Image: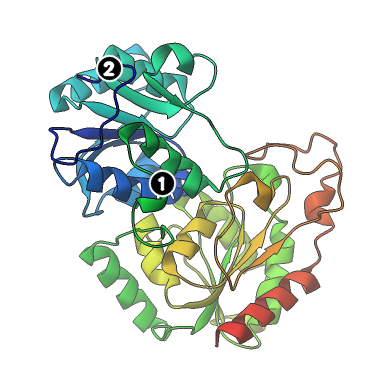
Amino acid sequence: MCGANRRFSMKNESMRILLIDTAYLGDLVLATPLVRAAAEHSSEGQVDIMTSPAGAQVLEHHPLVGSMYVLHKRGKQRGIAGLRAAIAWIRGRAPQTTIMPRRSLRSLLVARLAGVPCRIGFDHGLARMLLTHPVPFQKTLHQVERNLELMRPLGVQPSSTGKPGHPLEVFPSQRDRQEVDAWLHGNDLQHPGSFFALAPGSVWTTKRWPAQRFAQVAVALAAEKPVLIIGGRDEKDLGASILASLPAALAGAVHDATGLFTAAGSVHLLRHAAVLISNDSGALHLGQAAGIPLVAIYGPTAPSLGYAPRGEGHALLGRNDLPCRPCGRHGATHCPESHWRCMLDLEVAEVLAAASRIAREAA
């Protein structure tokens, strides 16, 4: 049992750890260092996961993930029946500890009602009553390091967890790799650095740089090497609209790969890109997991919130002179100020210059 003030520090203690994180795809990519840290501290050498369908795409083939429960909280498992099913699964796994990076009341309730003795999460609102070990949410840290603070109640110092630098780890399956390799070979894009990648989508409307400007970027970059548009299945219309707006002369020079591959497969795909130009979205974090140079476009959000690419060799673009920015942690469906200058003031030439610079530096 885990008392309110007890700290686990011995890996050989019998301790099964459950990670509950039902956030967006990008959040789960940023949580992969925590997955490794928790698994390495668990007595089983693995961590169980309760996650969203998007999270399952990221973690399904992770070698340190044991059992996984996919919670369709906005679909077939919405409501009380979904909660009961999730609680029953947790009781069946009988974890001694659950770690919850997402500040979610639903996650807190599921862990509490399932009777997990040690419940670790960020200190906010009702968390004080539902957690046994609330951890301060440190706004000044990067999300990776912020998540690793959740290891402290287990007696683990974040600086000692995971691999050096806490890299993002996404593991494509053999099928993912085969499908991507076949597609790349069929389009003569199989060599590293053989194309530029564009990720024009985002869950949040205000975080999407205008599609017309992505099209202009594609036209300019295609003069140098092929361009690939990437995104999830729900972004196929966006990819198709950009492709349809291009001059006929660019047929074959710009490829639309939206919706073709899983998130993990997209990481394998992006390993062949020279540069990824992306909104502040899940694709940006997949690009960092792929280890390629990134041009990150920030509108309503900002790198200071803790979700930016880490390390050297990236370009982080945004209008830092706007007093209204950032206007939120995750973006919104419309601009609170009704002018959307954070995106409209970012010119195509600036994005192209950044892409050319970091591609040249990486060569």
Where on the picture, by quarter, is residue 176? bottom left
Q: Amino acid at mark 2?
A: Gly
**Secondary structure of residue under mark 1:** helix
In this rendering, the answer to whether 163 lies above or below 100 is: below
Q: Which one is nearer the viewer's eye here, 21 or 278?
A: 21
Coordinates of residue 22 in the picture (x, y in percent): 40, 34
Horizontal arrangement in the rendering, residue 223 relative to residue 93 (left or right): right
What amino acid type is highlighted by mark number 1? Pro
- Across and down, in percent, residue 52 comes to 37, 37
Nearest the viewer among 155 and 220 is: 155
Residue 344: x %, y % from top left: 82, 55
Q: Which residue is mark 1?
A: 158
**Number of marks present in the image shown:** 2
Q: Residue at x 55, y 73 (%)?
A: 293
- Residue 5, x across and y down, in percent: 33, 19
**Residue 148 in view (yes/no):** yes
Distance from Cα at disc 2 to Cα at disc 1: 22 Å
Q: Height in image: 251 above or below 16?
A: below
Horizontal arrangement in the rendering, residue 318 relative to residue 270 (left or right): right
Residue 342, compared with residue 351, is above or below; it is above
Evaluate whether residue 248 shows in this view.
no
Quarter occupied by the C terminus: bottom right
Residue tagged 2: 3
Element at badge 2?
A: loop
Q: Nearer the viewer, residue 301 or 70?
A: 301
Assess disc 1: are there few (<14), some (14-19) or many (≥20) residues with their C-alpha within 10 Å of its C-alpha: some
- Name the residue rendered at 76%, 57% in the picture: 318
